Amino acid sequence: MIEIRNLSKTYKQQKVLSSINMRISTGIFGLLGPNGAGKSTLMRIMATLMKPTGGDIHIDSLSILSHPEKVRRLIGYLPQHFHVYPQMSPKEILDFVGVMKGVTNKKERREQIEHWLHEVNLTSKANEKIKNFSHGMKQRVGIAQAFMGNPKLVILDEPTVGLDPEEKLRFRNLLSKEGLNKSILLSTHVVTDIESSCYEIAVLKKGELLLDATVEELKELACGKVWEGTVPSGYLDNMAEDTILCSEHRGNTVHARVLADEKPFTGATMLEPSLEDGYLALLGGPSS
Ligand SMILES: Nc1ncnc2c1ncn2[C@@H]1O[C@H](COP(=O)(O)OP(=O)(O)OP(=O)(O)O)[C@@H](O)[C@H]1O
């Protein structure tokens, strides 16, 4: 169990996290929020790389402030920008991380390395230098190293960036297996990543926790507010930008999906909301 208590962070004069309270249990927990919401800051604090200005986080009853070394043994972390020595191979990186995580038995470390390289589909590249890897391949090394040492909490800051559709699917399957016995905190801008993997989510905006709920509860926020229909070209020009979810020109008409409390135009039909609709409804529309 992870407990975030009254957490706040100020950079110089700027408050970037304001009294965040959250609990994360076993399973996959999604962290959503627009650019600059404070997601990476929260994750860096959790990973003990940065101290909060106020509050604390307890991971398995251990405070990140009083026991940072012990906490580090319990967590795996993929930072938003994963940088490693370009001359190293995935095997060497995983070996290094394994030692840091306290996997001192060589045989056990080798087994874990083989396992995680297989899980991210990099077995055939195990001994190649990272400098020759694509962005997506480096990201997969980053994912593998976050799971080394069987951490209780895995913190993944935008893990799907750079992954192709096939690798995203592999990653999703990996998450659903690993989420059975550990806590995985995942931040992303890609709402569909959350929809397919997470049960619970938190939404941050400008350092405030706007919502801590289930995926279904977030969807429900847009219930009765999502409409679709076709209107003449130019009709949408008079509508507020923050109500138009998407639009597609078809000759002299426009087919649009709109967020509105009431029927926005004649012929509009109400739709079941997606998670993205719920998220945009919470934030106050697409342009907020
Ligand atoms: N080292 C720093 N010094 C000063 N301000 C910072 C620092 N790191 C982040 N910030 C500011 O803190 C706020 C939150 O940034 P953070 O990276 O945590 O947001 P985020 O939700 O992860 O954003 P994104 O989705 O764009 O990655 C932003 O306004 C950012 O400019």
Image: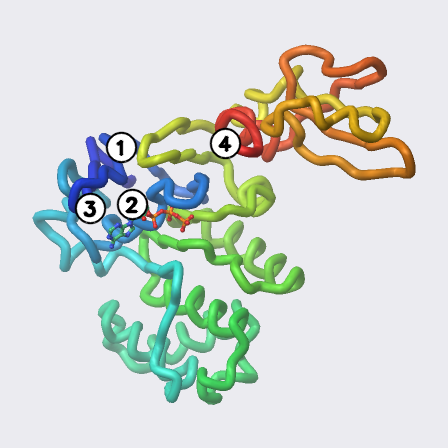
Q: Would the CB of label 3 be found within 8 Å of ligand 1? A: yes
Residue count near mark 4 (Cα–Cα under 10 Å), binned few <14, some 14–19, many ≥20: few
Q: Are marks 2 and 4 in contact (CB under 8 Å)?
A: no
The CA distance from mark 1 to mark 3 is 16 Å
The CA distance from mark 2 to mark 4 is 22 Å
Q: Give whichever of discs 1 and 3 has the lower sequence position.
A: 3
Q: Secondary structure at mark 1?
A: strand
> What residue does disc 2 label?
42
Amino acid type of disc 2?
Leu
The one of 243 and 70 positioned closer to us in this rendering: 243
> What residue does disc 3 label?
11
> What residue does disc 4 label?
288
Q: Give whichever of discs 3 and 4 has the lower sequence position.
A: 3
> In the image, what residue occupies the spot 36% across and 53% down?
155
Q: Give whichever of discs 2 and 4 has the lower sequence position.
A: 2
Amino acid type of disc 3?
Tyr
What residue occupies the far left of the structure in this picture? 66
Q: Would the CB of label 2 be found within 8 Å of ligand 1? A: yes
> In the image, what residue occupies the spot 45% across and 35% down?
201
Q: Which mark is residue 20?
A: 1
Number of numbered markers: 4
For residue 129, above or below residue 216: below
- Image quadrant where one finds the N terminus: top left
Q: Give whichever of discs 1 and 2 has the lower sequence position.
A: 1
Amino acid type of disc 1?
Ile
Q: Are marks 1 and 2 in contact (CB under 8 Å)?
A: yes
Q: Give whichever of discs 4 and 1 has the lower sequence position.
A: 1
Q: Give whichever of discs 2 and 3 has the lower sequence position.
A: 3
Horizontal and vertical percent position of residue 27: 43, 43
Q: Which mark is residue 139?
A: none
